[in-house]
Image (cartoon, helix red, strand yellow):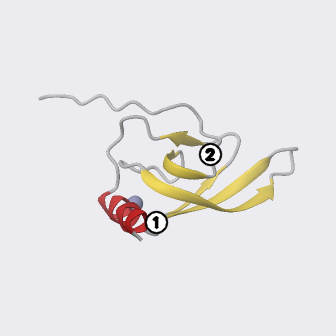
Amino acid sequence: MNQVVMITGPASTAERGWLKPAFPFSVRAHFFEQEQSVPDGEGGRSFAWRSLCGVDAFSTRQAPMFEAGNWTRCKKCEQQVTRRAAA
Ligand SMILES: [Zn+2]
C-alpha cells in the first residue's frame, strides 16, 4: 500500500487563503476567510473562520490555522476561487 505523506505548512498568520484548520480536523485544505476575531482572555486573539464551501473553523493560539502545505485542496472551494477570479 502506498502511503502519501501529507505535509502541513507552518502556522499561518494570513487572514484568508488555503488553510488547514487544527480544529475541526479535515482531510482537505479549504480556502478560508477570517470572519471574526475575539480576545482569548490571555492577551491573544481567537479567530472564527468560514471556508468558501461553508466549513466553519475556529483557531486559537494553541490550535492555529496552518498553511495548506501539500494537502489536497477542497474541490468546492477551488470552484469558488475560480469563479471569483473569472468575475
Ligand atoms: Zn472547501
Residue located at (53% from left, 45% from top) = 22
Task: State left or right for residue 44 relative to residue 75.
Answer: right
Task: State left or right for residue 79 relative to residue 64.
Answer: left
Looking at mark 1, is its residue's CB closer than 8 Å to ligand 1?
yes
Residue type pointed to by label 2:
Ala
Q: Which residue is mark 2?
A: 14
Q: Which mark is residue 62?
A: none
Q: As rendered, which of 81 and 49 lies closer to the eye? A: 81
The CA span between labels 1 and 2 is 16 Å
Q: Which residue is mark 1?
A: 52
Q: Are marks 1 and 2 in contact (CB under 8 Å)?
A: no
Residue type pointed to by label 1:
Leu
Q: As rendered, which of 38 and 35 lies closer to the eye? A: 35
Q: Position of residue 10 (x, y in %)?
A: 55, 31
On the rendered image, what quadrant is the C terminus found in? bottom left
SS of the residue under disc 1: loop
Q: Of the two numbered discs 1 and 2 on the same chain, state the one appearing first in sequence.
A: 2
